[in-house]
Image (tube, rainbow, N blue to C red):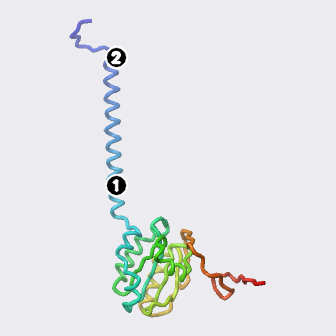
């Protein structure tokens, strides 16, 4: 075979075909990863987090003193149920924010321990509806459908009894670092159990 043979050996053709297949695979993988990264970043920037909502929430001290009713949410950064509701809560805040205080208290912050104990938070998200006087009217625990939250907020603004005063949904379990005092059978959370004393 001559050195400048115009017909390459079959091994060279197969090797160059394998190289182009490998290069094509690399390009295809790069395109797929680029699209996935773009969509992932786009999704992340448009999603709403409880942390972002909390930064824009009304401080509890302001809410108690400003003469407006309040929706107070106990949440945590790790709470999947809280995150699931974050988008709807943002929309509700946009709709009702001029009439209702939206307050968010992180259960992982020991600063809120007195409130955690006062409102008996044992699952999150835990919502407390407060009247214009700052007194508790009702509570809702867990993932609550938007329609139920809207009806409760409409009633809160109108100073009417809340139609869903004790709504419950899926929660993330939370145990406060200090347990509240034991209660008797008159407490609705006692489920009719009596504390016997000897």
Report the disc number at residue 39. Answer: 1
Q: Position of residue 48 (x, y in %)?
A: 38, 67
The residue sitting at the right extreme is: 198
Name the residue located 39 percent from the left edge and 69 percent from the top edge.
51
Residue ID for mark 2: 11
Callout 1 secondary element = helix
Position of residue 66 relative to residue 21, above or below, is: below
Query: Residue 40 vs residue 79: left or right?
Result: left
In the rendered structure, which disc, 2 or 1, sits on the residue that comes first in sequence? 2
Name the residue located 49 percent from the left edge and 67 percent from the top edge.
79
For label 2, the crowd category at 10 Å Cα-Cα, with few meaning under 14, some 14 to 19 and many 20 or more, is few
Q: Position of residue 59 (x, y in %)?
A: 38, 81
Query: Residue 123 vs residue 34: left or right?
Result: right
Question: Is the N terminus in the top left, top right, bottom left or bottom right quadrant?
Answer: top left
Circles 2, 1 touching at the beta carbon (< 8 Å):
no
Question: Is the C terminus in the top left, top right, bottom left or bottom right quadrant?
Answer: bottom right
Name the residue located 38 percent from the left edge and 74 percent from the top edge.
90
Inter-mark Cα distance, 2 to 1 = 42 Å
Is residue 92 or residue 131 the one in the foreground? 131
Name the residue located 36 percent from the left edge and 73 percent from the top edge.
55
For label 1, the crowd category at 10 Å Cα-Cα, with few meaning under 14, some 14 to 19 and many 20 or more, is few
Count of picture labels: 2
Is residue 135 or residue 116 the one in the foreground? 116
Corner quadrant of residue 61: bottom left
Position of residue 82 relative to residue 167, above or below, is: above
Q: Position of residue 136 (x, y in %)?
A: 50, 88
């Amino acid at each position: 075979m001559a050195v400048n043979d115009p017909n390459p050996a079959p091994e060279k053709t197969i090797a160059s075909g394998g190289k182009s297949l490998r290069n094509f695979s690399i390009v295809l993988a790069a395109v797929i990863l680029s699209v996935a990264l773009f969509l992932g970043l786009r999704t992340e920037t448009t999603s709403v987090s409880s942390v972002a909502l909390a930064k824009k929430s009304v401080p509890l001290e302001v809410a108690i003193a400003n003469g407006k009713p309040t929706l107070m949410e106990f949440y945590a950064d790790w709470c999947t149920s809280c995150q699931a509701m974050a988008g709807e809560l943002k929309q509700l805040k946009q709709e009702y924010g001029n009439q209702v205080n939206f307050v968010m208290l992180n259960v992982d912050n020991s600063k809120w321990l007195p409130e955690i104990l006062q409102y008996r938070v044992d699952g999150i998200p835990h919502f407390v509806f407060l009247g214009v006087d700052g007194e508790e009217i009702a509570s809702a625990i867990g993932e609550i459908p938007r329609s139920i939250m809207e009806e409760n907020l409409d009633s809160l603004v109108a100073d009417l009894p809340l139609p869903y005063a004790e709504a419950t949904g899926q929660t993330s379990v939370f145990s406060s670092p200090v347990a509240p005092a034991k209660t008797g059978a008159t407490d609705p959370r006692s489920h009719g159990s009596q504390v016997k004393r000897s």
